[in-house]
Image (spheres, rainbow, N blue to C red):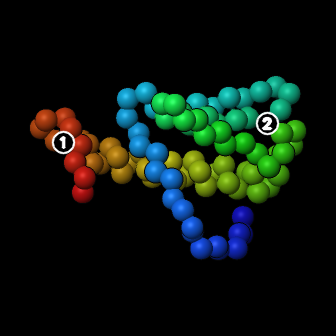
Amino acid sequence: MARRRTHRISTITLNTGRGTRATNHPYPARTPVLALDFGALSVLVTTSAGDQVTGSDVAFARQLAREALLFARSVERSFHGLPNGRGVAA
């Protein structure tokens, strides 16, 4: 999935915590939707077309899964082993 690098003009930060969740919604008649819920805000991740999946969609899904796993490991590493059970920023 080669994309031309563009200069970032803005960043949106969505903090995790109580009430946040990620949910996969598979559908029999259309492509799946990944919902990321942050309280009053929802982000829906879908494929480039609602009725078909491209090679780029598969590549992005794999990249997303890989990066989500690395994120989870980093969060766990920051949390585990602390006597008060609360994470610290490293």
Count of residue discs: 2
Of 68 and 50, nearer the camera is: 50
Q: Is residue 30 left or right of residue 85?
A: right
Between discs 1 and 2, the one toward the N terminus:
2
User: Label 2: few (<14), some or many (≥20) within 10 Å?
Assistant: some
Q: Which residue is mark 2?
A: 31
For mark 2, give the secondary structure.
loop
Q: Position of residue 84 (x, y in %)?
A: 13, 35
Dividing the picture into quarters, in which one does residue 90 lie?
A: bottom left
Instruction: Depth check: give the residue in front, 89 or 56.
Output: 89
1 vs 2, front mark: 2
Q: Is residue 60 left or right of residue 70?
A: right
Is 90 rendered above or below residue 51? Answer: below
Q: Which residue occupies the foreground of this view, 35 or 82?
A: 35
Distance from disc 1 to disc 2, alpha carbons, whole Å, reads 40 Å
Tell me: 52 left or right of 58.
right
| Residue 75, position as x, y percentages in the image | 35, 46
Q: Which residue type does callout 1 highlight?
A: Gly
Label 1 crowd bin: few (<14), some (14–19), many (20+), radius 10 Å: few
Q: Position of residue 31 (x, y in %)?
A: 79, 36
Q: Which residue is mark 1?
A: 81
Q: Please state which amino acid type lies under the numbered disc 2.
A: Thr
| Vertical position of residue 52 compared to residue 10: above or below | above
